[in-house]
Structure formats: C-alpha cells, structure tokens
Amino acid sequence: MTSFDPRRVRIDTPLLTREIHGRPITYLDSASSTLPPRAVIEAMDRYYTGHHANVHRGVYQTANEATEIYEGARAEVGRFIGAPDPENEVVFTKNTTEAFNLLARSWGAANLRAGDVVLVTEMEHHANIVPWFQLREERGIEVRFVPLGDDFRLDLKDLDRLFEGVKLFSFTAISNVLGTRNPVAALVRAAHDHGALAAVDAAQAVGHQRTDVRAWDADFVCFSAHKMLGPTGLGVFWTRAAILASMPPFLGGGGMIADVRTDGFVPASGPTRFEAGTPPIAEAAGLRAAVRYLTGLGLDAVAEYEHALTVTALDLLAESVDGRVRVIGPREATERTGVFSLDVEGVHPHDVAQVLDEYGVCVRPGHHCAKPLMRRYGLAATARASLGPYTLRGDLDVLVEALQATVKLFG
Amino acid sequence: MAGLDDLYREIILDHYRSPRNRGELDHPTARTEGFNPLCGDELVVYLVVRDGVLEDIKLTGHGCSISQASSSMMSAAVKGKPLSDVRQIIDRFKSMMTVHEDGTDPEAAVTPDLRTDGELAALAGVVKFPVRIKCATLAWNTLTQAIDDAARA
C-alpha cells in the first residue's frame, strides 16, 4: 500500500522552493534531468561528512564503510530493477551514454564481425546511435533503423526483413522526444525469436514506472541516476552475470585488474572489471537513496499519477492556446508518457523557451539529441515539457499561461 | 534584471515577421553557409561584390527570432556599402555582442549609439541573455566568411 502524494514530493525537493524572475519555479524538464529530493542530497552529504575513503583498498574503518556503501548501492540498484543476481550484474558508468559505449566497445567489439547487423530505431537518442556508427567505421558492421510511422510509433510491419542478419536489437523503452512507450517485452521476444540479443535504453523509464529486467527478458539495460531523482555523474549498465563474464574490459587502469606485471595484466572478474579508476562513490550513495525514495513512493502509483496528468496535459494543450500548439507524439495517453514536444505555430522553440523562462517555466528547446527522429518529422527543434513525480496540475496551468503569452507576443 | 522587453524589441519582432533581403541570388560572388549545431539554425548568405562594394546580399535559412532578425538587420545595414565600411560595421556589432572581463557584467559591454548604429542598437539587449548571443552572431560570422570567400572567387 502506498501513500503517494505529489505535494509531499514537492516538499521533499528543495529546488522547487526557488523563485525564477520573481515567480515560483515551474520545473517541466524532468526528461533532461530530474530534481533530487533532500534524502538524496543528504545521503551524499552524509557520505562525505562521515564515511569518505577510497573503495576496495583500505582496511581501516571508513574505507570499509565506503566500500559497503558503494557495493550496497550496486546490490540495491540491482534489486530495484529485478536483476536475478543483483550483486554481480550492475556496472556503474558515468551516464547512459557511457553505458552504451561500454556495450558497443566491449560486447560489440568482441561479438560483432563485418556484415553483422545492429538494429536500432529512428527514435533513438544519439547515445544509442553514434557508438554503433563508430563500430561500423572500425569493423564494417551494418547499422539498421526500424522506421517511424506517421503515428509516432515504431513501424514494425517488416519485422522479419528488418531482423535479417541482426545480432543485437538496441532500442529505447520510451522516446525522449515523443514520449512514445514501446512494447519492450514484445520487442525483446522478437529479437530472441530472430536469434538476436536485446538492449534497452531505460533512461526515460526507470524514474517513472516499475522496471523489471526479468519481465522484459532483456539482455542489456542502460540508464542514468539523474533521471530517477539521483545525482549526475552516475549511470548504470546491467546485463546477466553470464554475459558480463564473457565481456572484455573497456577502460583500463586501477581497480579493474586482478594482476598487473611488466608483461601484461589479468582483468578482475565481476562488475569492477569495467570500473577502472576511483568510481563515483558519493553518487552511488545518492542513487541508493533515490532508489529507496522511489520505492517508498511506489512506482506503480507514480506511473498512475503521471498517466492521469498526461491525459490532462494533452487536453489542456489541445484546447487552451487557440489550437496553435501541436504536440509532436501519440495523441492517446495510453501509448505515451509525460514527455510533450511542443511545436508552437509561428514561433521558434528557442523563443518559446525564452518567453517561458520569464514565467519561471523550465522546458528544453532543441533537437534533444535525436536528430534522425527530428529529420523524420521535418523538424529542426521543438520545445519539450516533461513531467516528474513532483509535477502538479498547477504547473500545467502556468505552462499554458506562458504559452498564451508567447503566442500573443509573436502575434 | 534583464526582462523580455530587452530582448524582443518591437523592431526585432518586425524584422522577424517581415525579414528583409530574403531569397537567393542567381549569380553570387559568394554563397556561404552558416550553422548553429546547438539549436539547428541554418543560414545561407549570397553576396555580389564588385569593385570593393557589397552591391547585393540575400539570405535564406531558418532559425529563432533573434537569428532571423539579426540577419535581416545585417543585410539592410551592409547592402550597397564599400567593403571597408562593411568590415567596420561587422567589428562594431561583434564588440557590441562581446561580454567583457568576467563575462557576468552586461553593463560592461559596448554601449550602442542609436545615431550611428541605427536599428542594430536594438540587438544590444541580446548580450543580457548570454545563451542567445550565438543566435545573434550567426549571420555576422557567416557574412565575414562570405566576404573572405568572395575575395577568393
């Protein structure tokens, strides 16, 4: 039983007390980065105040505590996403982008030959496109795209042809531009049926709905702490222990070795094999607090709440600004999440975001690191508003007020 | 505090809504493209330079109101002028868009003069919005490049 209340989350989130240009902040940029609750900030503060030491090295008391905090965070994140072996399957990276680079550079380089196909989709973030292009340049793999339909969903008509020669299908759970929710379990099954492995970009999912890597049956899952109420500078790469054990090291250095001699090295086993150098320990402490906080809210309740708010937002945006605001993405709330790419008739997204800022409204203008998607729909940029567990109906009203002012100013 | 009125002067909105010198030139001395990769703004400058005079200029492309207005105002300010004058206008505008010293004091920027800077003075407010400066300077950097291209043509 959960007692989820967005007003409670607001009280817990210090940044939401800020004023911007004399107005209360209206934060609608959670798809870029979520705002951390006090519990996350305090966990990092507690770590530096009482436990800071390097991990995996010292035998003294605080070094043991730091290691316990860091490894404890790993296991707790593993349990949070339903990992079968939570202590041994979570690799901490810098962010989702680095997690995909790890996938391409380690698993990809070890398993893909010239002519092998990596299947991605036209709605991917550049983080799930560019590393594959880099691998293509190095070893001649093919990068193929699942096209997008006019309904802002994946066009899966020609699945058998798309999967020809595919070794890995790497796709996003939720589009960071359109809000489109992909059928993750079904897509993973399609990959497996065609003899391919499946990687899921869960960056836009983990903070907004329950994530269960076993229910998805995915082989790889990547996400970032700062999009789930945690700190920046920390990402997660998950794969099953057996696959992890078969992957060669990615970055070399201290911490990732079992032995180093003048004639070579033996890499460590387990997740630390991929964590060269001193890792982000305080950030791991922050992520652990975020995981506990989200668990306390109840992710099913968060998803249900954000869905209801999405329905409201779609209606408001369709009706309130003289029909001059087009939401680029599925119209049906059941097919999408609370990510709204706005195209305001006659006003450039940068100008929209600039006027909105005057009202204390934070949205993100630009191509959202998804240029193939933008090109597909003939857009140079959009102004994107997105929800978090602290977003209230009142935030949407301020957004609409500011959009009306924008339209008025530009005529 | 900088308000929206500092940025969106009426004259700027006018140039945005009715941009001057839009279109292409059939036989340009130079055709130069400019990009702002961060926001996706694109601009093409067409020049006709003859006997050291910038005889004609046309622009195509898309972008925000600041980049569109800045390019429109620029075209009006430089058309028909000797290149030596054009270069002076470019330098003057770029210094107007430069935040001096510690980069946080907009008052330290060059003060525009309505008599000599004309309409361009309206763009001076952009400097109070640091992330928008690149929107205003895109056209001018592209013009600088176009003049160099024309010299080589």
Image (cartoon, coloured by chain):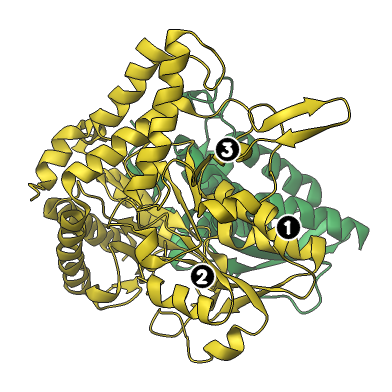
Q: Are marks 1 and 2 on the same chain?
A: yes
Residue at image location 56% in from the left, 66% down from the top? A371
Disc 3: which chain?
B
Nearest to the eye among marks 3 and 2: give it: 2
Q: Residues within 10 Å of mark 2 (few under 14, many from 20)?
A: some
Q: Which residue is mark 2?
A: A374
Q: Color of chain A here?
A: yellow
Spatial distance from mark 3 to mark 2, Cα to Cα?
31 Å
Along the viewing direction, whichever of A61 and A39 lies nearer the viewer: A61
Residue B121 at x, y = what percent?
51, 42
- Residue A38 visible in the current orientation: yes
Residue A149 located left or right of residue A372: left
**Height in image: A100 above or below B131?**
below
Left or right: A208, with A195 as reference point: left
The secondary structure type at the circle numbered 1 is helix
Q: Residue furthest top?
A: A60
How many labels, in total? 3
Q: Position of residue A381 (x, y in %)?
A: 48, 64
Pointer 3: residues within 10 angstroms few (<14), some, or many (20+)? many
What is the three-letter code of the residue carrying label 1? Ala
**Residue to which mark 3 is pinned:** B97
Chain for mark 2? A
Do callouts 3 and 1 point to residues on the same chain?
no
Q: Position of residue B35 (x, y in %)?
A: 65, 58
Give the mark nearer the N terminus: 1 vs 2: 1
Give the amino acid type for the residue marked by disc 3 in the picture.
Met
For residue A19, side relative to residue B129 (left or right)? left
* Residue topped by disc 1: A109
Q: Amino acid at mark 2?
A: Met
Query: Chain coloured green: which letter?
Result: B
Q: Secondary structure at mark 2?
A: helix
Asked if the residue at tag 1 contacts the one at tag 3, i.e. Cβ–Cβ closer than 8 Å, the answer is: no
